[in-house]
Amino acid sequence: MRTLDKYIVTLVTKSIFLVLLILVLLVSTLDLIDEIKKYDFSLALAYVLLSIPQNTYEVLPFACLIGSFSSIAKLLIANEVTAIKAAGISTSKIFKILFISSLFFSSFSLFNGGFLAPNGLQFGNEIKIINQKSRVSLKDNSGTWVKNVNEFINIKNILPNKTLKEVYIYKFNTNQQLEEILTVNEAKYANESWILKDITSTNFMEKEILTNKIDSAVISKFIDLDLFDFIVIQPNEMSLFQLNQYIEYLNNNNLDPYEFRLSYWEKFSQSALCLIMIILSMTLLKVNPRSMNVNYIVLQGVILGVIIFYLASQLINYP
């Protein structure tokens, strides 16, 4: 019995990993072609390699679907399922063996999507930031530093919804003398403009230091939005632990955590989809290979799996 368990689990696992390898190589190659257009080859390659866990996370349900269906179809076509049943092993026993495999891939999806993939994406973005080093400094204890012509901008807190908290703008003249310091409590991008709130201006160029306070101001140019994409961590780049912390932070500050809560539960739904895809393939065990076209049934199952994946993604993104 243990030999049978090992044989079926190995067959299904190998098949799923083979499909997974093909899909990840395909997606990563397309990513590399796209990144080469924007960066040099070594930087693009490093970013794509760090994105492999994320690509694995995204295509794993499809790999589970195709791999499990193809492996069970192989057993049917070779009449191995018939032989197993003739040996007195029930269909429910085979279901149990396959269910163990589905739990492994479901757990792997959750671990990869919840921890490995987000870390890979964060490191990948830091590599991109290195390419922007003339304009951006990596984060340190004092926050994120951005250079903008004759200005140095220090940002203490960056929110993914294009909102900056505690911003300090140091303006220098052409002689590199400090001209003015602007302290902005909040800066938010909306309607193609930046809205600055609670501004304190300290001017050093007059005979005496002048301080002025402004409730709000609207400016068209502040931080390049392309640059903003590098310095902000998106919800899909956060681990489960980071998402949980950030959702709590947003709730405590009366901010909408919807996008982050969505990303949090999406990781669990992706894990559940891996489980569902393999369970779906178990229906093949009821097929009689002599009276029905196995390949046709496999095609139907794969199409059904794709529909389930699509409906699940729509459901998780439904407001």
Image (cartoon, rainbow, N blue to C red):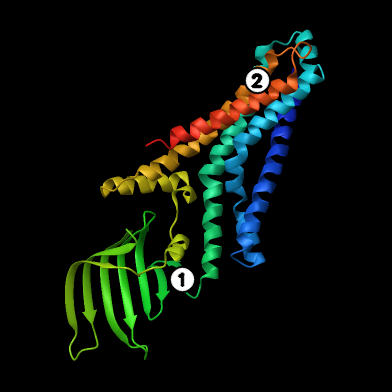
Which one is nearer the viewer's eye here, 303 or 8? 303
Is 310 placed left or right of 192 in the picture? right
Residue 308 visible in the displayed image = yes
**Three-letter amino acid code of the residue under disc 2:** Met
**Three-letter amino acid code of the residue under disc 1:** Val
Q: Residue at the location (54% across, 64% down)?
A: 128
As drawn, the label of residue 282 is 2
Q: Relative to 66, does residue 203 appear above or below in the rendering?
A: below
Q: Where residue 215 appears, x then y in whole percent?
A: 18, 66
Which one is nearer the viewer's eye here, 161 or 310? 310
Report which quarter residue 280 is drawn in: top right
Mark 1 lies on residue: 136
Q: Relative to 54, does residue 209 appear above or below in the rendering?
A: below
Cα distance between the residues tagged 2 and 1: 52 Å
Q: Where residue 145 appears, x then y in whole percent?
A: 41, 71
Q: Secondary structure at mark 2?
A: helix
Q: Secondary structure at mark 1?
A: strand
**Quadrant of the image for the C terminus?**
top left
**Quadrant of the image for the N terminus?**
top right
Q: Residue at the location (42% across, 75% down)?
A: 147
Q: Rate crowding at label 1 as few (under 14), some (14 to 19) or many (20 or more) other CA atoms within 10 Å.
A: many
Q: Residue at the location (44% across, 32% down)?
A: 315
Q: Where residue 285 appears, x then y in whole percent?
A: 69, 16
Q: Residue at the location (51% across, 66% down)?
A: 129
